[in-house]
Amino acid sequence: MYKFLLFLSSFIFLYSCSNSNNTEINIPLTSEAESLAEHSKEFEKKVLSYDTPGGMIHFAIGFGIANSIMVEGENGNIIIDAADSVYEAENIYALFREKNKNPIKAIIYTHNHGDHTFGAAYYLQSQKEKPQIIAHEDTDYYVQRIMGILNPVITSRSTKMFGTLLPEEDVINVGIGPNLSVSKSPTGYVKPDTTFSDSLNLNIEGIELELYHAPGETNDQIFIWLPKHKALMPGDNIYKTFPNLYTIRGTSHRDVKGWVDSIDHMKTFEPEYLFPSHTKPILGKDTIQDAMNIYRDAIQYIHDQTIRLMNQGLYPDEIADAIKLPKEIAESPYLYEFYGTVRWSVKSIFNGYLGWFSGNPSELDPLSRKEKALRISELAGGNDILLKELLLAVQEKDMQWALELSDYLISLDMFTDEVKDLRIEALIYEGSRSSNPNKRNYFLTSAFELKGGIKETSLLDRTSEDLLHQISINTLFDVLSTRYNPESELINNYKVCFSFLSGKTKNITLRNKVAVISNNAEDNCDLKIISEEVEFKKTLTGLSNPVTQIASGELIVNGSATEFLNFLTKFR
């Protein structure tokens, strides 16, 4: 199958874990693992129902990562966050329907992350009328970016962070939910049709809603206040674990000061019910206020102390070593490091304010990874001495140093079976002794990959034609630009023009080793392509064969069809 764009690329493959002896890894049961297992009680799979002053609210927890909430209205209901997959949305809605069979009139996304949006398509399939889809005005932008230019790297790192490629028995939980179910069904994202900037008041089926922009875990985050219900849905701005002020899967800078301000805004409503998008509800006005107070104080503490030490000239690693939460904050059950960590947060705050340069002149233009490894090897007395030091580090359980030593040997092309086995041992040791599931899963997955325990067995294309209608043609052209391999360029100023039956035009000019995207209608084109937008999207994502599309007339090529096919190969 032609697949010129690696769109949703990391979602394409299903993996299985081999049971052969040479690929098994033994993960010891540690006290840290036991504490993480105890945390799993926070998201036991069930639907909880609450008879609030304004009516019934049903809360589905333990279905994938994110919670899903249904608010009952007069003749219809509202879904807040649509689960991480069509698979989980179907499971959830089967239980919601047992509570109330009225149709779903609206779906509200608290923010752009896939665990809150990728199940929405199920509600379009299961309802006679399309529900209204409500979100912040920036939500679709961030979804398009994640499913577009950043998808391969974000998804690759996410599979490690969430442990989706590990044997099921080795995943304790993912900190804010039992597991990530996103790969169990095609992506079910649906674009919002009602958006707002700062706030929005609605009345849907007698349910009074106030929606407010509340930057925090994401820039498009919102919270939802139901005044009659005295209930607040904070999205991901509070849950029962230390917040991901930075996520190791990779993210834009998270506005930590804005996060504090958002919690302060939520506090002013004095809710009696708090329904977070992860972990259990919090009930009672005083309990909720106490939880929000200590949560926002912890975030402010990390922010303020990082800034204080930045201004004293400390480097990021020095600040990360220096800052610990005060005892009265650290002992709160809402702040155990089962998701984010203080040290990762400090580095992200530093980078958010000052960028990647630590301020140390030796780190402005450091030696390359390989050159540094060569110097370290020479200093140690040769590669064999480095290998002996690696073996000694593993024997003495000095595993972080062992990982760093193995990095040097890998850079020196010394990634022998012995070095690999020692690195695997270090990864398993460090991962199994972490109560933070992000670190645990990342390390254990890395070890399992090195061991050869992850095998590609079949294809599951999570891109569907329905999804392509939700993906902007602009997104796909942005992806084309970033997938262009300049080494394949043979000619300069080569232009291919695209005319879509929707009236949109796009052009790609290969010039100066870049693929320049423009929107203006052009006459001086080397090739001109005419098609429906969705047909070209199908070409790029592999849902259709371009040769067949050209033969059937779904893609019209004014010029050489062979030349056009060769042009597409430059973006593989």
Image: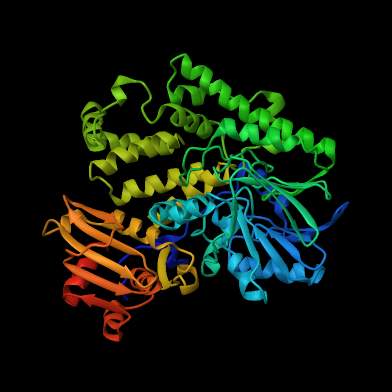
The quadrant of the rendering that contains the N terminus is bottom left
Query: Residue 430 at what x, y percent from top left?
Result: 49, 41
Give whichever of 348, 547 is nearer the camera.
547
Asked whether the viewer can see residue 22, the reply is: no
Give whichever of 325, 235 is nearer the camera.
235
The relative height of residue 22 versus residue 348 in the rendered view (above or below) is: below
Give whichever of 325, 141 is nearer the camera.
141
Task: Please identify the residue farthest to the bottom as the structure is shown.
Answer: 552
State which quadrant residue 262 falls in: top right
Query: Residue 258 at what x, y percent from top left?
Result: 59, 33
> Is 330 positioned to the left or the right of 218 in the image?
right
Task: Please identify the residue farthest to the top as the structure is shown.
Answer: 312
Give whichever of 500, 250 is nearer the camera.
500
Asked whether the viewer can see residue 517, the reply is: yes
Residue occupying the point 22% across, 29% down: 375
Figure coloring:
rainbow
Residue occupying the point 50% across, 50% down: 161
State which quadrant residue 3 falls in: bottom left
The relative height of residue 106 versus residue 347 in the rendered view (above or below) is: below
The number of numbered discs placed on residues in the rendered structure image is 0
The quadrant of the rendering that contains the C terminus is bottom left
Query: Residue 327 at what x, y percent from top left?
Result: 69, 24
Residue occupying the point 56% across, 21% down: 305
Task: Please identify the residue farthest to the left as the structure is shown.
Answer: 491
Query: Residue 559 at what x, y percent from top left?
Result: 17, 75
